[in-house]
Image (cartoon, rainbow, N blue to C red):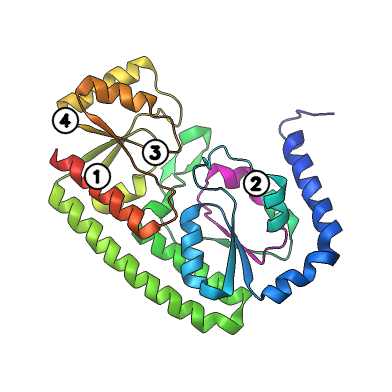
Amino acid sequence: MRRQDNGNVAPLSLAAAVFVVLLLAAATAGCTGTERQDDGKVVVAVTIPPEQEFVERVGGDHVRVILLVPPGADPHTYEPPPGVLADVAEADMYAAVGSGIEFELAWKEKIAALNPEMRIVDCSRGIDLISTGEGGHPGTDPHIWVSPRNAKVMVENIREGLAEVDPANADDYRRNADAYLKELDALDAEIAGALAESGAKKVMVYHSSWAYLARDYGFTEVPIEDEGKEPSPQRIEHLIEQAKEEHIRVIFASPEHSTRNAEVIADEIGGTVVLVSPLAKDYLENMRHVASAFAGSGRS
């Protein structure tokens, strides 16, 4: 029977999923335990696609990555299927974003319970988090990875975690991380130059995903959503007036969210909607695309 006593008992669907995964892991331990040993790779679970790139670039041939929130899914609402959780039960390490992303708020403890021996790395360690009450959480903006400067910290945390899990290959992890950090340094300089040259000062977006990028590169993010919720008609009217007054001609939305309200505003100001994703796996190219799009809006 489902209970609702102040949230002390997990919803039946989540508890049942974890129970099934534990049974699957126990039932298959004898027949699959040699598979990972023969594979010889460190198994690393990650929450979002950008982290997958970070781990693969640092880990190289030594790692195999399990992605928990697949491309196109919204980490604010996604629930992983039992099969994915069964794979996570075999992981050596979980690289958690660590900044309050909703998926991890709901699932991190359950994932940790699947494998008490799994090393959990908080990729946000050392990052100055932005406080927010968005979504009713008295916490922080979770989108730390959208700034290359934060991505560098995440990569260092991943490198340290891999070295602890697999000290025999620590030198390889260091070399790989150093090489990738140089690419992130170049990306940082490229984005800083493009945004400074463009003069972009305000960027209107549907979902507030870009606050860390805005903080690091000197512009302001104007979200259409109201603290993570659909905007009221009054808010939409206010944003239309603001866009007209400040000559904003481009409204940014993401493939993971509805574009309806962004299109309403764009139609009213004679502007356009441009899709940019904070969750694409090809981090370097995606962030170049995002920076170019934001810089272009400043020149419009």
- Dot 2: element: helix
Is residue 157 visible to us here? no
Q: Quadrant of residue 77?
A: top right
- Under mark 4, the amino acid is Glu
User: Label 3 to label 4, Cα distance in Å?
Assistant: 22 Å
Q: Which residue is mark 3?
A: 254
Q: Which residue is mark 4?
A: 246
Position of 153 with respect to 235 (left or right) is right
For the residues labelled 3 and 4, say whether their Cβ atoms are less than 8 Å apart.
no
Position of 66 with respect to 82 (left or right) is left
- Position of residue 276 relative to residue 194, above or below, is above
Which stretch appears magenta? 88-108
Q: Quadrant of residue 185?
A: bottom left
Within the magenta stretch, is there residue 92?
yes
- Among the two numbered marks 2 and 4 on one chain, the one whose residue lies closer to the N terminus: 2
- Among the two numbered marks 2 and 1 on one chain, the one whose residue lies closer to the N terminus: 2
Quarter of the image for the N terminus: give it: top right
Residue depth check, mark 3 versus mark 4: number of the one nearer the observer: 3
- Under mark 2, the amino acid is Trp
Q: Which residue is mark 1?
A: 294
Within the magenta stretch, is there residue 50?
no
- Under mark 1, the amino acid is Phe
Q: How many marks?
A: 4
Residue depth check, mark 2 versus mark 1: number of the one nearer the observer: 1
User: Label 2 to label 1, Cα distance in Å?
Assistant: 33 Å
For the residues labelled 2 and 1, say whether their Cβ atoms are less than 8 Å apart.
no
Pick the residue in front: 46 or 38. 38
Query: Residue at the spot x=56%, y=52% of the render?
Result: 47
Q: Which residue is mark 2?
A: 107
User: Label 4 to label 1, Cα distance in Å?
Assistant: 15 Å
Quarter of the image for the C terminus: give it: top left
